[in-house]
Image (cartoon, rainbow, N blue to C red):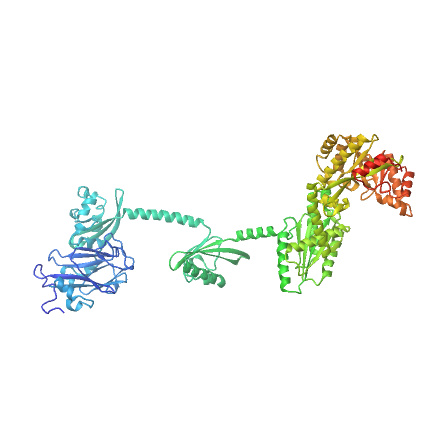
């Protein structure tokens, strides 16, 4: 320890040159202590390495404090004063504490404990006659206050009272520094008379014209009136000098009749503040324009800041929301959900998004909350009203799953429900269901007759009737056009499904009144019952569709339950369709010819060309097995065109070999009749085959013509202009066309084979009478009659007795290939 010869300094014994007084600052760290001998006039203290004294702690500001040496000009004694700021006046973040009290400025006394930012602790000592070596030897980790002793009143070194020291502001303290020329800020003194008594170097550099301008200079203007008013000792004001802004600290020392002032250039700060203000104003305007509710929240859901939204209502007024917890103003479940996401955001530092609903003013509103981390313990919650978006999404979803015309579920929604019921049936084995496929009969005819507007009204009315036939849990969907499907859940058996089908038939049997039109419509219904074989909704609809077509083929306006035999037939039909398409490509078709005989002469006057399909594995396939399929698929057009060309070509060859006039009859399908260029194609074929148009007889069925009489009439007139002959096939079946017959430019009628067959079997002679009536009408219209299906001599005799001009049937010959037909022409048989 120190020897007894070291004595403690007192104000009476400290005299310059006789005794050496040391001012020490001992900084304490966990690893040890740092001892600094304070010998300079100014020390900057902080975390930044550029400071005179560097403190190593994050709790300490970069420029935390300033240590100034205060000298008494009369005695040259000095002490140190510590200030919580740098020389530019910027205070520390976490504060300065002396002897446990936070302060801005403090005149240090022997033994004072200084804490910087609550982290770094230091002690201030004053010692006499200690060399550097002795300080280092005696100042270890232990407390050194024992050998330094204490000073009872260090303020006497300056000859100033404690009260006066405590009232010093920053400008006054800077003026009292031993070397004010080192201070970068202007410092000056002025007497009440206006005389400048002191200017530090910074003042001369910053304001070189200060003495010349005198009291007219901005930093001097108004100082004297302030002093004379004696309203206070300290004043701070902002002064503009040119394009720069300064903060001026004014200390009126009335007892010394003196004004001291320190001036700090805050131009950059002001520009920054102005830019910040403009930015804040702009941001505030933007925020106010945003309709979203914004909340600054603590981690426990307490509202720290609040920006209201016009369309968002909370349970407490805006003025009372800050400080409230979300649990106080929101339903508990919503508040707990929000707090959960707040904690999640703070934990992951990722934006969290969730939605919730509130019932406000009898309306269910939807909100989206976006939580963004704003600090270690706070988040910004942005709450947006998404009610309109949700309603729009719900409308889109509804529209995506419902038919726009009828409002019924569409195919997509039906498929979803079918998939659900299939899965439910797998889980609950006793649960049964059925699917009904409903197709309106002859809806196209009604739609074309009444127009599409009334057709749409009819579909809507039918949909409403379907709904009356079902239970609450059942589904009726419109698949498109005139097709509907019905899902019956939780049924007891097939009777439940057939009862619904019968109710549908009964409802549709009642007339529909549409714009003063009474409309009747029927429907064909296919039913498929649940089995464990179904895995996909498509399979259910497929089989129900198959059953519906089977019902339609049985005569329409009925229902049919699907069985596996139907599926087998469908597969066979599908295979036939594939084979038929390849047959067109591979030219597997042949033309057979059946003779047409004059019943007057008994001689052959022509042939009817009939298509045959020579299948590579199934052999010869008759038209009855593939013509309808070809009609449905559209393949009838290329097949019919090929048959027409082959028949015309063969007829041209026969006409050259056999002088007697021969006609060739070729059937036109409904698809061909609707071809816009039909007449042009036939004309080209006649030219290529060199066949006279009058030798070609085109046959079309009565039903094809009557489906669209106007179109048929137009096409027949175009064909008639080519000078070809026109014939109505299967006359007398399907439609009552007698009233239209005079409008069609036809040359001949073919009496349907059913009437010819009745000649032998009908005891009441109905067949003969119908045939007689047809022939009488035809003769009056100068139209020839061809009787088809003649198989017996008795039939032939009856037809001759009725003056029928032509006949055709197995009695004369079956359809023949080219060679057999030529042989018949060579033999020239007579019947």
Give the quarter of the image for residue 118: bottom left
Q: Can you name the residue that lies furthest to the left here?
A: 18
Count every numbered label the image shows and give the total.
0
Front residue of 91 and 740: 740
Residue 270, placed above or below residue 130: above
Q: Quadrant of the N terminus?
A: bottom left
Residue 36: which quarter of the image?
bottom left
Residue 567 lies left or right of residue 753; in this view the side is left
| Residue 65 screen position, x and y as percent | 24, 57
Instruction: Tell me what residue is drawn at x 39 percent, y 58 percent.
Output: 378
Q: From this viewpoint, is residue 382 visible?
A: yes
Quadrant of the snapshot with the C terminus: top right
Q: Looking at the picture, how far across and down is residue 353, in whole percent? A: 47, 56
Q: Which of 142 and 800 lies nearest the eye of the viewer? A: 800
Please give left or right for residue 409 compared with residue 274 in the image.
right
Find residue 82 and report its image quarter.
bottom left
Q: Position of residue 437 (x, y in %)?
A: 70, 53
Q: Is residue 673 something one can see in this rendering?
A: no
Residue at the (38%, 48%) spot, across then down: 281
Give the x, y percent position of residue 294.
44, 54
In the drawing, does residue 288 fall left or right of residue 452?
A: left
- 256 or 348, which lies in front? 348
The answer to whether 815 appears left or right of 291 in the picture is right
């Amino acid at each position: 320890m120190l020897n007894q010869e070291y004595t403690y300094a007192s104000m009476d014994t400290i005299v310059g040159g006789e005794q050496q007084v040391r001012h020490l600052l001992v900084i304490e760290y966990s690893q040890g202590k740092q001892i600094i001998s304070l010998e300079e006039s100014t020390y900057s203290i902080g975390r930044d390495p550029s400071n005179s004294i560097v403190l190593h702690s994050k709790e300490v500001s970069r420029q935390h404090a300033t240590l100034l040496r205060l000298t008494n000009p009369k005695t040259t004694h000095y002490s140190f004063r510590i200030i919580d700021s740098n020389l530019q006046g910027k205070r520390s973040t976490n504060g300065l504490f002396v002897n446990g009290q936070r302060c801005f400025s403090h005149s240090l006394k022997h033994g004072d404990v200084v804490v910087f930012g609550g982290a770094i602790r230091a002690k201030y000592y004053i010692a006499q006659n200690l060399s550097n070596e002795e300080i280092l030897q005696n100042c270890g980790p232990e407390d050194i206050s024992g050998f330094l002793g204490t000073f009872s009143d260090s303020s006497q070194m300056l000859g100033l009272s404690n009260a006066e020291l405590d009232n010093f502001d920053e400008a006054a303290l800077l003026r009292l520094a031993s070397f004010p020329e080192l201070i970068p800020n202007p410092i000056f003194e002025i007497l009440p008379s206006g005389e400048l008594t002191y200017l530090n170097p910074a003042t001369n550099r910053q304001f070189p014209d200060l003495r010349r301008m005198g009291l007219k200079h901005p930093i001097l203007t108004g100082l004297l009136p302030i002093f004379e008013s004696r309203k206070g000792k300290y004043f701070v004001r902002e002064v503009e000098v040119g394009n720069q802004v300064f903060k001026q600290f004014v200390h009126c020392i009335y007892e010394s009749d003196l004004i001291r002032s320190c001036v700090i250039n805050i131009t950059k700060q002001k520009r920054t503040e102005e830019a910040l203000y403009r930015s804040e104003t702009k941001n505030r305007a933007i925020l106010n324009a945003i309709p979203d509710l914004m909340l600054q929240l603590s981690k426990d859901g307490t509202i720290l800041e609040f920006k209201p939204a016009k369309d968002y209502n909370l349970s407490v007024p805006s003025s009372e929301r800050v400080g409230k917890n979300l649990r106080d103003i929101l339903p508990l479940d919503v508040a707990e959900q929000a707090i959960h996401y707040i904690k999640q955001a703070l934990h992951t530092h990722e934006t969290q998004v969730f939605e919730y609903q509130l019932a406000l003013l009898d309306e269910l509103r939807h909100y989206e909350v976006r939580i963004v981390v704003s600090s270690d313990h706070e988040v910004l919650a942005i709450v947006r009203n998404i009610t309109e978006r949700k309603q729009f999404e719900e409308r889109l979803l509804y529209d995506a799953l419902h038919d726009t015309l009828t409002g019924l579920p569409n195919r997509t929604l039906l498929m979803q429900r079918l998939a659900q019921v299939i899965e439910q049936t797998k889980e609950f084995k006793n649960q049964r269901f059925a699917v009904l496929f409903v197709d309106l009969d002859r809806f196209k005819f009604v739609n074309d007759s009444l127009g599409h507007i009334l057709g749409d009204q009819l579909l809507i009315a039918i949909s409403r009737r379907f709904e009356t036939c079902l239970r609450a849990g059942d589904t009726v969907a419109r698949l498109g056009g005139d097709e509907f499907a019905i899902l019956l859940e939780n049924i007891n058996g097939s009777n439940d499904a057939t009862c619904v089908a019968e109710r549908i038939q009964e409802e549709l049997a009642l007339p529909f009144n549409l714009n003063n039109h009474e409309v009747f419509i029927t429907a064909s219904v296919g039913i498929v019952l649940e089995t464990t074989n179904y895995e996909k909704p498509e399979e259910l609809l497929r089989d129900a569709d198959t059953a519906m077509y089977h019902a339609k083929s049985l005569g329409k306006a009925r229902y049919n339950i699907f069985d596996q035999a139907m599926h087998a037939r469908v597969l066979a039909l599908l295979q036939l369709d594939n084979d038929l398409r390849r047959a067109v490509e591979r030219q597997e078709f042949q033309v057979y010819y059946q003779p047409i005989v004059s019943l007057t002469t008994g001689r052959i006057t022509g042939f009817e060309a009939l298509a045959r399909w020579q299948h590579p594995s199934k052999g010869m396939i008759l038209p009855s097995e593939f013509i309808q399929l070809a009609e449905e698929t559209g393949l009838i057009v290329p097949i019919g065109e090929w048959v027409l060309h082959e028949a015309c070509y063969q007829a041209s060859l026969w006409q050259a070999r056999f002088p007697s006039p021969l006609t060739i009859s070729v059937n036109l399908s409904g698809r061909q009749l609707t071809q816009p260029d039909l007449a042009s194609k036939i004309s080209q074929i006649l030219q290529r085959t060199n066949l006279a148009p009058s030798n070609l007889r085109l046959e079309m069925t009565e039903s094809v013509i009557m489906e669209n009489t106007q179109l048929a009439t137009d096409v027949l007139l175009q064909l008639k202009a080519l000078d070809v002959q026109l014939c109505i096939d299967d006359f007398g079946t399907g439609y009552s066309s007698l009233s239209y017959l005079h409008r069609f430019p036809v040359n001949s009628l073919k009496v349907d084979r059913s009437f010819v067959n009745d000649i032998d079997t009908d005891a009441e002679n109905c067949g003969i009478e119908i045939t007689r009536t047809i022939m009488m009408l035809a003769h009056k219209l100068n139209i020839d009659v061809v009787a088809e299906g003649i198989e017996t001599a008795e039939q032939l005799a009856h037809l001759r007795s009725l003056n029928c001009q032509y006949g055709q049937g197995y009695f004369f010959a079956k359809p023949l290939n080219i060679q057999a037909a030529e042989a018949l022409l060579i033999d020239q048989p007579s019947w």
